[in-house]
Image: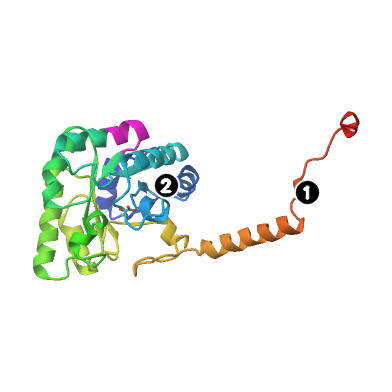
Amino acid sequence: MAKTIADWRRMKEAGEKIVVLTAYDAPMARLLHESGVDILLVGDSLGNVVLGYDSTVPVTMAQMLHHSAAVRRGAPEAFVVTDMPFGSYQCGHRQAVANAILLMKESGCDAVKLEGGAEVAPLVERMTTAGVPVMGHIGLTPQTASLLGGYRVQGRDLPAAEKLLASARALQDAGVFAITLECVPKELAAILSNQIKPPIIGIGAGNGCDGQVLVCSDMFGLYEKFAPKFVKRYANLAPLMRDAASQYVREVRSGHYPDDEHSFTAATDYQSLSGT
Ligand code: KIV
């Protein structure tokens, strides 16, 4: 049966971990859903791991719509959250709510995620009031990483930790159904998870969170450019794919592929064609 946001709240209350992975296309969405992943996140990490950008900043609404719709087609029964890309929610509440609704209507996702703490709480309230389920995202927020001094651990000192807790509370009061918490010390993440009612989904935030999220290309070892400390590679697919491609290159060049096993045979001798 398809899951709803009530299931995530119930899982937190029951102490069951919520498992989230990113997905960007239909076959990956199908595979991850069949593996028992609870939530598929169409992350704007799409910019880095699929589209070849150096950051998530260039990602557009059109790209998020395109990939989110593919994920929905690949896993019609999955709970799909789609990232609002940078620029789609910073230019006024009206436009932001319209963009969130567009993502839901056109891609079929179940919810949206947006980055920011207390400063985005009034916007989150507008969205949830309009009927859009919202996941927050605090700690390291990649869309504004340059303002944070780069991709670094957040909330290390007490004032920064207090600010994060205040942000989580503001998002909770604004009606988020869950919060992604990225790159914070595990002790702080555990405190937030205990004090905040919506599930806290950690990434680089230790084991005390209510759930975990990873970028699928990182955990499959498909994205070799950079791997943060918190990424565990559950597979190392890039060398396997490179080997397979090299073997194909060799076999095509040497004429070993396609062999008879991978070719069709004629039901006729095509005699009338031979003289032409
Ligand atoms: O875009 C993304 O993949 C994300 C995860 C890092 C949580 O926001």
Q: Secondary structure at mark 2?
A: loop
Q: Is mark 1 within 8 Å of ligand 1?
A: no
Check residue 103 for magenta coloring: yes
Mark number displayed over residue 261 = 1
Classify the position of the C terminus by image quarter. top right
Q: Quadrant of residue 103?
A: top left
- Count up the numbered dots: 2
Residue under the point 14% across and 41% down: 123
Instruction: Tell me if label 1 and label 2 are in contact, CB under 8 Å.
Output: no
Tag 2: amino acid? Tyr
Left or right: 29 with respect to 189? right
Specify the quadrant that holds the N terminus. Answer: top left
| In the depicted structure, whether residue 123 falls above or below residue 102 | below
The image's mark for residue 24 is 2
Disc 1 residue type? Answer: Glu
- Earlier residue among tags 1 and 2: 2
Q: Answer whether residue 2 is magenta in the image.
A: no
Q: Which residues are magenta?
A: 102-110
Quadrant location, ligand no. 1: bottom left
